[in-house]
Image (cartoon, helix red, strand yellow):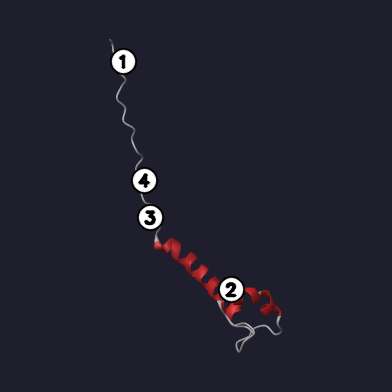
Amino acid sequence: MAEAVAPSVTPTTPVVLPVSLPVRTVLPWALFVGLLALVALYFVGAEQGATSVFAGSDVHEWVHDGRHLLGFPCH
């Protein structure tokens, strides 16, 4: 019996190189997102309190469920 010989091909796996992100590129965006998070935390947690920026209860009503979700007492 004759055997068919197939060429021996070994599959190669692609080499994955890590992506380098310079801090100089990421830092402004990280500061911007951090500032937005602090502003959101202020409106959810402290607005309508002693440091209220806006008069009335409109902001309180907009973030009322968020207050309870994050554990801030409001009434």
- Lower position in the chain sequence, tag 2 or tag 1: 1
> What is the spatial separation of the Cα atoms under label 4 and label 2, in whole angstroms?
41 Å
Mark 4 or 1: the one toward you: 1
Q: Residue at x 58, y 73 (%)?
A: 69
> What is the spatial separation of the Cα atoms under label 4 and label 3, in whole angstroms?
12 Å
Q: Which residue is mark 2?
A: 69
* Disc 3 residue type (three-letter): Ser
Tell me whether circle 3 and circle 1 mark residues in contact (CB < 8 Å): no
* Disc 1 residue type (three-letter): Ala
Badge 2: residue crowd in 10 Å (few <14, some 14–19, many ≥20): few
Q: Could you tell me residue 74's position as x and y percent?
A: 62, 83
- Lower position in the chain sequence, tag 4 or tag 1: 1
* Disc 4 residue type (three-letter): Val
Q: Could you tell me residue 34's position as x and y percent?
A: 50, 71
Residue 60 is marked as none
Dot 4 falls on a residue whose secondary structure is: loop
Mark 2 or 3: the one toward you: 2
Q: Which residue is mark 1?
A: 4
Residue with the most extreme top position:
1
Q: Quadrant of residue 9?
A: top left
Q: Relative to residue 27, is residue 12 drawn left or right?
A: left
Mark 3 or 1: the one toward you: 1
Dot 2 falls on a residue whose secondary structure is: helix
> What is the spatial separation of the Cα atoms under label 2 and label 3, in whole angstroms?
37 Å
Badge 3: residue crowd in 10 Å (few <14, some 14–19, many ≥20): few
Q: Which residue is mark 4?
A: 16
Mark 4 or 3: the one toward you: 4
- Lower position in the chain sequence, tag 2 or tag 3: 3
Front position in the image: 68 or 32: 68
Q: Which residue is mark 3?
A: 20
Tell me whether circle 2 and circle 3 mark residues in contact (CB < 8 Å): no
> What is the spatial separation of the Cα atoms under label 4 and label 1, in whole angstroms?
36 Å
